[in-house]
């Protein structure tokens, strides 16, 4: 009898647990959300799908089509807004701490729409484990977290994406956080930090380069630098470039600048190798330039 009760209890607990990390749509969507406000952000005419929630998920909400392509987004004051391609029938909604939610728009009577329409959904659900508010507002107790990105432009704190322009000084609720940063060609950053009330934390990241790196310096102003390797080809303007994560192989470099003879050279870039090249262009004599 005790064994039977225990088995039933475990089954009920498993069912309950399986429902604690589900996102859901609450109520019916509101149609004709004001689309004009977001038109300039997306730089094109587009339908809008927006989400609001009483959960702390809007800062890191992502929406994908069924091919896995992420929809363009804008974080508004009280909602997350996404550009909705006309042919979209189903979307996948993703938030840290929750299972993915697959949403069939036709289930809500949205079978066709034009590029001047909008739809507003309310999201509800319970996160996996305990999820705390991250950012501090108003009278919240807080600490200050500062970042210098060397060379990262984006990081995640507890899974929430932080853009460089917003990360000079973050007011954050005291708690334990996981800081993650990734960039092709560099060693991943993954740090656990305890944030205490009233403290100021400054993080400088200097990750190791783990893939091929090419640095070229040209001793001439406004040079045109073309590098190529097989089908790979890129052209830059300036006197200094540094490229990370280039394909390995034999490269050709063509450098030119007004008033100088062009320069061509070859080299082989190996996996994980850091190559530095200096190019000194020979000036064309004035009388030759005049001719």
Image (cartoon, grey):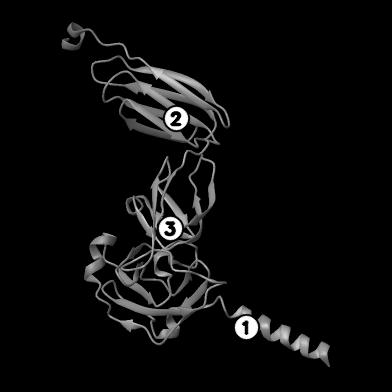
Mark drawn on residue 247:
none
The extreme bottom residue here reads 1
Which image quadrant for residue 50?
bottom left
Instruction: Name the residue: 72% across, 87% down.
Output: 9
Residue 153 against residue 16 in the figure, above or below: above
Regarding mark 1 in the picture, which secondary structure is present there?
helix
Instruction: Name the residue: 32% across, 51% down.
Output: 165
Between residue 15 and residue 101, name the one nearer to us: 15
Regarding mark 2 in the picture, which secondary structure is present there?
strand
User: Callout 3 environment at 10 Å: few (<14), some (14 to 19), or many (20+)?
Assistant: some
Instruction: Name the residue: 29% across, 69% down.
Output: 77
- The residue labelled by disc 3 is 161
- The residue labelled by disc 1 is 16
Q: Earlier in the sequence, mark 1 or mark 3?
A: 1
Q: Is residue 113 visible?
A: no
How far across and down, in percent of the image, does residue 91 sit?
A: 46, 72
Give the foreground label among 3 and 2: 3
Between residue 203 and residue 162, name the one nearer to us: 203
Give the foreground label among 1 and 2: 1
User: Callout 1 environment at 10 Å: few (<14), some (14 to 19), or many (20+)?
Assistant: few
Between residue 72 and residue 257, name the one nearer to us: 72
Mark drawn on residue 228:
2
The extreme left residue here reads 290
Regarding mark 3 in the picture, which secondary structure is present there?
strand
Q: How far apart are labels 1 and 3 at the CA level? A: 30 Å
């Amino acid at each position: 009898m005790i064994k039977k009760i225990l088995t039933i209890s475990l089954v009920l607990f498993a069912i309950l647990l399986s429902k604690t990390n589900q996102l859901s749509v609450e109520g019916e969507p509101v149609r004709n959300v004001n689309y004009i406000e977001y038109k300039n952000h997306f730089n094109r005419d587009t339908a809008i799908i927006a989400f609001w929630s009483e959960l702390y998920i809007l800062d890191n909400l992502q929406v994908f089509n069924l091919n896995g392509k992420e929809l363009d987004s804008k974080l508004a004051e009280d909602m997350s807004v996404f550009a909705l391609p006309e042919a979209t029938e189903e979307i996948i909604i993703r938030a840290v701490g929750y299972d993915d939610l697959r949403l069939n728009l036709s289930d809500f009577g949205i079978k066709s729409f034009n590029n001047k329409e909008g739809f507003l959904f309310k999201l509800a659900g319970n996160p996996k484990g305990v999820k705390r508010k991250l950012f501090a507002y108003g009278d919240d107790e807080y600490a200050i977290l500062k970042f210098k990105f060397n060379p990262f432009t984006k990081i995640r704190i507890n899974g929430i994406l932080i853009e460089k322009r917003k990360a000079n000084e973050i007011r954050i609720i005291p708690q334990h956080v996981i800081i993650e940063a990734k960039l092709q060609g560099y060693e991943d950053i993954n740090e656990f930090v305890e944030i205490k009330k009233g403290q100021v934390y400054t993080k400088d990241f200097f990750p190791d380069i783990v893939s091929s790196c090419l640095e070229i310096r040209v001793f001439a102003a406004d040079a045109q630098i073309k590098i190529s390797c097989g089908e790979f080809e890129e052209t830059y303007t300036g006197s200094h470039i540094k490229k990370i994560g280039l394909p390995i192989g034999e490269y050709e470099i063509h450098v030119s600048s007004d008033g100088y003879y062009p320069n061509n050279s070859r080299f082989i870039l190996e996996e994980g190798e850091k190559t530095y090249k200096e190019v000194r262009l020979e000036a064309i004599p004035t009388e030759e330039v005049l001719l």
